[in-house]
Image: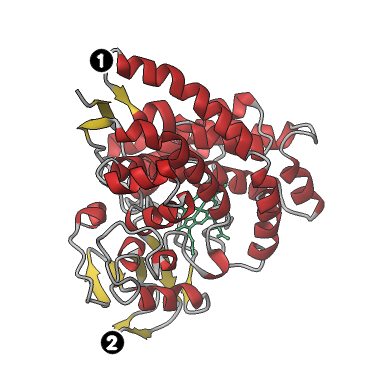
């Protein structure tokens, strides 16, 4: 059940803590916010721990590739977090993100021409493959000034990493994934060691501040997953949802509904990051439940957006309804998502440009999501034009 939290019916009135399969699941907006705000009692150190313990054989495979994952961004409860985060957020300032909006719009429009032509010819299309799969990576590579050979391997590696760290696995699959992730990690390390200063400027600034090769490699490793898998998944989930929201599509097309508000409501209802973890440093009372020290606290972020204490119509897709922006899709506090503005910009461009096509399409095959503790990871969105 924990691996398919997005399928669980949400009891909106319920806030509290339940122990399920070794994780203390936290429900309710206020309780989740309380945890996110208290980094002394609820540390982020376990955020990237493998949910299926890594076997000795898989550990050996990773070690053979020199894989190490020290405290980096999301899992960093140490004093280095603030400086490392500042280095990353410098790359992701709103003014810098805005510079890429026109480029993204152009590339999307160029993709929509052959896609529309093919649909008009009666063929089916996979909107995940055609639009969401690689666009977030393309823009991330531009924003971070990453070279093509590094960007090329990211999609295979990041899908493998989401499975290796967050999915239930058997031994054979775990070894296979460890080999994939280890190989790409070794490539990243070589890049961090040898990149010219003009490539990946974050590296120069990190080294100048005394960060080690391990730390910079780990930060890049995390960014390449967090900075594109999440948005890629969100775009597919949002397009799918909008296909059943004709009034919203009409409003987007005639300009009476703002894309920004559609994206916020999408984040509230269709967040790709369903849960996120913290670990307790001491015994603590939370929502009437006593948690032991070292407890894995599983924050049901997707539930927070559907809490009727936050919005009056939790299950309705109503852009601009009061409370719509109070979701916790990006977490909160010192570790809140550093790429939220980039993700929002990408989603705004996509819903604006794709709305006319979505209105004319019907779903042939909805996205299917594999078992995963935290990520939706939809596989495809097959559509065809209405006849
Ligand atoms: C819809 C897209 C996205 C969603 C739903 C999402 C969600 C999240 C969540 C839930 C966290 C953990 C927050 C916490 O612990 O309080 C997080 C952290 C993070 N995200 Fe995102 N994210 C998205 C897109 C992005 C993008 C595009 C980037 C970068 C380009 C990015 C970079 C990061 C980083 C660096 C962190 C760690 C921040 C820290 O620990 O200081 N994310 N994200």
Left or right? Give the position of 197 relative to 340.
right
Q: Secondary structure at mark 1?
A: loop
User: Which residue: 72% across, 45% down?
Assistant: 202
Q: Which mark is residue 368?
A: none
Dot 1 beta carbon under 8 Å from ligand 1: no
User: Which residue: 27% across, 67% down?
Assistant: 313
- Discs 1, 2 touching: Cβ within 8 Å: no
Q: CA distance from mark 1 to mark 2?
A: 57 Å
Q: Position of residue 104 (x, y in %)?
A: 57, 34
Q: Hey, which quadrant is residue 290 in on the image?
A: bottom left
Q: Position of residue 114 (x, y in %)?
A: 43, 16
Q: Position of residue 384 (x, y in %)?
A: 25, 24
Q: Is residue 103 above or below residue 234?
A: above
Query: Which residue bears the numbered disc 2?
Result: 288
Q: Secondary structure at mark 2?
A: loop
Left or right? Give the position of 145 relative to 349.
right
Q: Which mark is residue 122?
A: 1
Mark in the foreground, 1 or 2: 1
Q: Position of residue 19 (x, y in %)?
A: 23, 71
Q: Hey, which quadrant is residue 83 in on the image?
A: bottom right
Q: Is residue 154 above or below residue 49?
A: above
Closer to the N terminus: mark 1 or mark 2? 1
Q: Give the crowd class for mark 1: few <14, some 14-19, many >=20 residues within 10 Å.
A: few
Q: How many marks?
A: 2
For the C terminus, which image quadrant?
top left
């Amino acid at each position: 059940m924990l691996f398919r939290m997005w399928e669980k019916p949400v009891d909106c009135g319920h806030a509290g803590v339940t122990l399920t399969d070794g994780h203390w699941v936290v429900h309710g907006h206020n309780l989740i916010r309380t945890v996110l705000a208290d980094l002394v009692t609820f540390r982020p150190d376990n955020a990237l721990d493998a949910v299926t313990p890594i076997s000795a054989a898989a550990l050996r495979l990773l070690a053979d590739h020199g894989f190490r994952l020290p405290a980096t961004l999301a899992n960093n409860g140490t004093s280095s977090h603030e400086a490392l985060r500042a280095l990353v957020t410098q790359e992701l300032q709103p003014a810098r993100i805005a510079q890429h909006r026109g480029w993204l719009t152009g590339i999307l429009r160029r993709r929509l021409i052959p896609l529309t032509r093919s649909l008009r010819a009666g063929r089916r299309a996979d909107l995940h493959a055609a639009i969401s799969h690689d666009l977030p990576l393309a823009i991330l590579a531009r924003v971070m000034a990453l070279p093509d050979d590094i960007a090329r391997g990211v999609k295979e590696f990041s899908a493998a990493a989401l499975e290796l760290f967050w999915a239930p696995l058997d031994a054979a699959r775990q070894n296979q994934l460890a080999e994939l992730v280890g190989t790409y990690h070794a490539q990243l390390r070589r890049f961090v060691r040898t990149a010219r200063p003009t490539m990946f400027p974050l590296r120069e600034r990190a080294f100048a501040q005394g960060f080690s090769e391990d730390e910079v490699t780990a930060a890049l490793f995390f960014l390449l997953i967090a900075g594109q898998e999440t948005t890629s998944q969100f775009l597919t989930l949002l397009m799918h949802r909008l296909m059943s929201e004709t009034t919203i599509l009409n409003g987007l097309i005639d300009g009476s509904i703002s894309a920004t508000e559609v994206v916020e409501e999408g984040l509230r209802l269709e967040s790709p990051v369903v849960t996120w973890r913290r670990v307790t440093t001491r015994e603590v009372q939370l929502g009437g439940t006593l948690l032991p020290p070292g407890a894995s606290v599983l924050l049901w972020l997707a539930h927070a957006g559907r809490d009727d204490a936050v919005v009056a119509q939790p299950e309705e897709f109503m852009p601009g309804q009061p409370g719509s922006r109070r979701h916790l899709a990006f977490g909160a506090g010192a570790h809140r998502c550093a790429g939220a503005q980039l993700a929002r910009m990408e989603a705004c461009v996509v819903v604006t440009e794709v709305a006319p096509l979505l209105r004319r399409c019907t779903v042939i095959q909805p996205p299917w999501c594999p078992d995963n503790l935290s990520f939706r990871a939809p596989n495809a969105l097959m559509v065809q034009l209405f006849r």
